[in-house]
Image: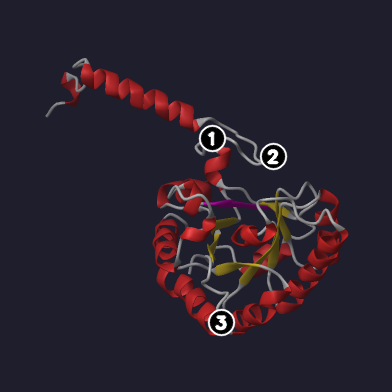
């Protein structure tokens, strides 16, 4: 085993000491770059459904596809904690099926843990998986797999009833044994309150500045995904524009007979 490889206890120890850096990846090339930089967590997110595969949401991807992407990511990573995102209906049907699918992430694609969306409704399932030896990352707030029930992608926790439910969910997930919780799409003050009232790390995405860490979809910050982006996304570079420029230059040179040049010929 790689002695520099991060583990679940390493992530837990960072709470209150050091910000946790997390990001998504879907292929070995990007994952390798992220790992070289030193991200703590690399998530093979079900967001691959709408960022890479072109679907309108995360509900269109299944376990077989997720395993393929997870395998690819694992090939590029030596240090970061790798997490497989349990896709839609891979854990909602029964805890037995959930365990079977979670185990596939570990045994087939070398993930170190899995992520499950939802709160107290999945308490028994999460406990069942954890007791079987597979670490679980929780996820509450704006949970994309449940956006149809929410009536769209909207901030959660603005209403008092929702706020109370999310606070309860966080405590229940902590009691269930998750090693950290993703807080997505909620008011900053609520995320701060949750962070201060659980002993495990919180990792924010659209949840403000007071979480123990942050996670983001890599293609969003690289400027590859088309507009519009959620408010919380900061685009650090516009790769879409750079790629379009390079491809247009290649196409033009081919059409004008400028490529290949003599130095490209055997």
Earlier along the polypeptide chain: callout 1 or callout 3? 3
> Label 1, label 3: how many angstroms apart (C-alpha)?
38 Å
Image quarter (top left, top right, bottom left or bottom right) of the C terminus: top left
Disc 2: which residue: 231
Secondary structure under tag 3 reads loop
Look at the image and give the residue range highlighted in magenta.
20-24
> Label 2, label 1: how many angstroms apart (C-alpha)?
14 Å
Q: In the image, is residue 73 above or below residue 3?
A: above
Quadrant of the rendered structure where residue 68 is? bottom left
Residue 20 in view (yes/no): yes
Give the residue drawn at x 65%, y 41%: 230
Secondary structure under tag 2 reads loop
Q: How crowded is mark 1: few (under 14 residues within 10 Å), some or many (20 or more)?
A: many
Nearest-to-viewer mark from 1 and 3:
3
Disc 3: which residue: 94
Disc 1: which residue: 223
């Amino acid at each position: 085993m790689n002695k520099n490889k991060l583990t679940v206890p390493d992530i837990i120890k960072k709470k209150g000491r050091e910000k946790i850096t997390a990001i998504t990846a879907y292929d070995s090339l990007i994952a390798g770059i992220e790992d070289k930089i030193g991200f703590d967590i690399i998530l093979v997110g079900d967001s691959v459904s709408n960022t890479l595969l072109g679907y309108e949401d995360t509900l269109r991807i299944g376990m077989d596809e997720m395993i393929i992407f997870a395998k690819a990511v694992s090939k590029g990573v030596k240090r970061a904690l790798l997490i497989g995102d349990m896709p839609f209906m891979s854990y909602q049907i029964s805890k037995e099926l959930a365990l079977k699918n979670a185990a596939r992430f570990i045994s087939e694609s070398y993930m170190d843990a899995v992520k499950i969306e939802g709160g107290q409704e999945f308490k028994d399932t999460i406990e069942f998986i954890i007791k079987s030896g597979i670490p679980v990352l929780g996820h509450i707030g704006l949970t994309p797999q449940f956006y149809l029930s929410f009536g769209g992608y909207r901030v959660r926790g603005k209403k008092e009833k929702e706020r109370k439910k999310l606070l309860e969910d966080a405590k229940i997930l902590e009691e269930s044994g998750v090693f950290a919780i993703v807080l997505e799409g909620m008011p900053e003050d609520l995320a701060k309150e949750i962070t201060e009232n659980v002993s495990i790390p919180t990792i924010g995405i659209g949840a403000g500045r007071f979480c123990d860490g942050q996670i983001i979809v890599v293609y969003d910050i690289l400027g590859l995904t088309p507009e519009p982006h959620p408010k919380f996304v900061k685009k650090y570079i516009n790769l879409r524009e750079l790629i379009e420029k390079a491809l247009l230059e290649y196409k033009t040179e081919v059409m004008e007979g400028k490529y290949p040049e003599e130095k490209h010929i055997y």
